[in-house]
Amino acid sequence: MILRAVVQRVSRARVTVGGEVVGQIGPGYVVLLGVSREDDEAAADYLAEKVAGLRVFEDEEGKMNRSIQEAGGAVLAVSQFTLYGDVRRGRRPGFDRAARPEQAEPLYRRFVERLRALGLHVETGRFQTHMEVELVNDGPVTILIDSEKTF
């Protein structure tokens, strides 16, 4: 189980599909989520809990010491199979380790629902659709997380 996430602290973000805004947040996180063939529900739950508990918002002393819940932020979760792009050989990425859509979508949905169950407001992109993701990275703060604890 090696679910991957790129978590970016943002001041605002939105996802559009065909010119229509399908998800939008103010301060919070954009989470780009990659699902591998080996992932399961436990990995999705672990990653959601890790994201919810990250302390990367500044406290009164300017230290990154507050969670997204304490900061009153929201999450924009976007499925991104390209996080499993393998470029170790050649120039064109291979995606053999990425989960097939029929496996990835339920785990992506579980990740989103787990974040909501933890009390977060979550907006989403549209699964298996070409999206335009706009964001203003705040800091910048970008954190890599995976369920194998590689990062």
Image: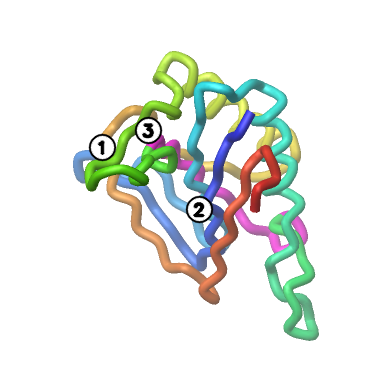
Q: Label 2 amino acid?
A: Val
Q: Label 3 amino acid?
A: Arg
Query: Label 2 neighbourhood size at 10 Å, few (<14), some (14-19), many (20+)?
Result: many
Residue 77 falls inside the magenta stretch: yes
The residue located at (45%, 23%) in the rendering is 99
Which element carries disc 1, helix, strand or loop? Answer: loop
Q: Which residues are magenta?
A: 69-81
- The residue tagged 1 is 130
Which element carries disc 2, helix, strand or loop? Answer: strand
Looking at this view, name the residue that lies furthest to the front: 89
Where is residue 97 shown, x and y percent of the image? 44, 28
- The residue tagged 3 is 126
Q: Is residue 136 left or right of residue 5?
A: left
The residue located at (72%, 56%) in the rendering is 54
Q: Is residue 139 left or right of residue 13?
A: right
Spatial distance from mark 3 to mark 1, Cα to Cα? 8 Å
Quarter occupied by residue 107: top right
Residue in front for this viewpoint, 147 or 90 = 90
Q: Examine the rendered structure and indicate whether residue 87 appears above or below residue 12.
A: above
Q: Examine the rendered structure and indicate whether residue 131 appears above or below residue 108.
A: below
Tell me which numbered mark, 1 or 2, is placed earlier along the sequence: 2
Residue 144 falls inside the magenta stretch: no
The residue located at (49%, 54%) in the rendering is 25
Q: Examine the rendered structure and indicate whether residue 98 appears above or below residue 27.
A: above
- The residue tagged 2 is 30
Looking at this view, name the residue that lies furthest to the left: 18
Which element carries disc 3, helix, strand or loop? Answer: loop
Q: Label 1 amino acid?
A: His
